[in-house]
Structures are given as C-alpha cells and as structure tokens.
C-alpha cells in the first residue's frame, strides 16, 4: 500500500522512527549495552532493496570482572621500634607505617641514635628511604643500604617484622 500524499508519507516516516527508537530502547531497559548506530538516516540503507533496513545491534562481549584478592594484612597504622648494633653501640629507629590492601600508603621513621656518627647515618637513611617503601606491598618489603646507610636498614627491617606480625593478628 503506497501513501497517497505528503502528510501520509510524513506520518509513515514518523511511525517508522518511533518504532526504531522503541526497538533500540528495549536493551537499555533490560540493562544491556548496545552499539551506537551511524548518524545517517536508517531508511534506504541496503538490505533487500525495499528501502527498509533493520538496525544492527551487536552483542557486547562479556566483561571480565577482576577477582577480589583477600588481604593478608589488616588495614591500619602500626608502630614498632627496631634496634641494631653499630660501632657506637645499640641504636634504634621507630617506624610508623600505614597499610591499605597490603600496600604501604605512608611511613615515617624516627631515629634514636646513640652517638653523633649514628645520628649522621640515620639522618642519611631518613632522607632517602620513603621512595623504596611507599607504594610497595608489605609482604616482600625489606631494605638494604639506603643513602649510604647500611646499618639503619637493619633496625628498620626489625621494626617492619614486628609491624607485619601486628597487622596479621
């Protein structure tokens, strides 16, 4: 059946547009994603030569949902003091460390030196250790020589061992 005048033709086009909009909106109400159709008019686009075309909606591939990994350590802020022997005697450092999902988000070290030489090396350690700690997983964290200080990391690691035990409890 052929429309007889422009008014009927406009009504037919409007009805087709409404039908297409309805078909395209069904997946949205069902919570499904659809692909965006081209902005060119849908009429007279290939197919069977009738001037009608069916919009193509492709299926979206399933989305991989990352598995939630369980934390080994409890989130929180922990403090411990580690000691070590130096040529000047027993020295200590107090470490305060914040954990979030097993990752160190903040850390501070308070040096407790027995003499001026130890204080010098502890200050060297404090000036450069954070870059090796913040953002790292606590499980494998262990420091060696930092900023020329080779003994202060022993105290840091001793405090870290205590913090790991606290955070697992």
Image (cartoon, helix red, strand yellow):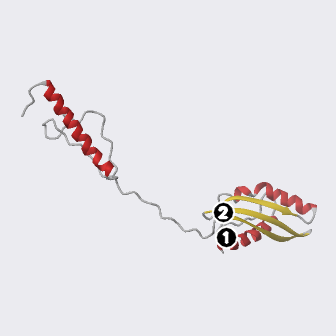
- Which residue is at 80% across, 59% downward? 125
Name the image quarter holding the C terminus.
bottom right
Of marks 1 and 2, which one's residue comes earlier in the chain? 2
Q: Mark 1 points at which residue?
A: 167
Total numbered labels = 2
Q: Is residue 155 above or below residue 42?
A: below
Q: Is residue 165 above or below residue 137?
A: below
- Which residue is at 44% across, 60% downward? 65
- In the rendered structure, are the residues bearing label 1 and label 2 in contact, judged by CB atoms less than 8 Å apart? yes
Q: State the image quarter where residue 55 is shown.
A: top left
The image position of residue 93, as x and y in percent, is 82, 65
Q: Residues within 10 Å of mark 1 (few under 14, many from 20)?
A: some
Q: Distance between the residues labelled 1 and 2?
A: 9 Å
On the question of residue 45 being in view, the answer is no
Q: Disc number at residue 12?
A: none
Tell me if 140 is positioned left or right of 80 in this view: left
Outermost residue on the left side: it is: 1
Helix, strand or loop at label 1? It is helix
Helix, strand or loop at label 2? It is strand
Q: Name the residue under label 2.
A: 99
The image position of residue 54, as x and y in percent, is 20, 42
């Amino acid at each position: 059946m052929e429309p007889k005048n422009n008014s009927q033709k406009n009504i037919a086009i409007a009805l087709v547009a409404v039908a297409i909009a309805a078909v395209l909106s069904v997946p949205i109400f069902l919570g499904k994603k659809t692909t965006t159709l081209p902005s060119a008019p849908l009429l007279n686009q290939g197919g069977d030569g009738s001037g009608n075309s069916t919009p193509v909606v492709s299926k979206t591939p399933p989305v991989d949902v990352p598995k939630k990994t369980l934390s080994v350590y409890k989130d929180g802020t922990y403090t411990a003091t580690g000691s070590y022997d130096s040529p000047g005697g027993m020295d200590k450092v107090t470490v305060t460390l914040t954990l979030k999902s097993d990752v160190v988000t903040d850390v501070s070290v308070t040096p407790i030196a027995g003499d001026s030489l130890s204080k010098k090396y502890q200050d060297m350690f404090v000036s450069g250790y954070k870059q090796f700690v913040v953002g790292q997983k606590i499980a494998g964290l262990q420091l060696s020589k930092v900023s020329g200080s080779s003994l202060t990391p022993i105290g840091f690691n001793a405090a870290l061992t205590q913090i790991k035990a606290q955070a697992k409890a």
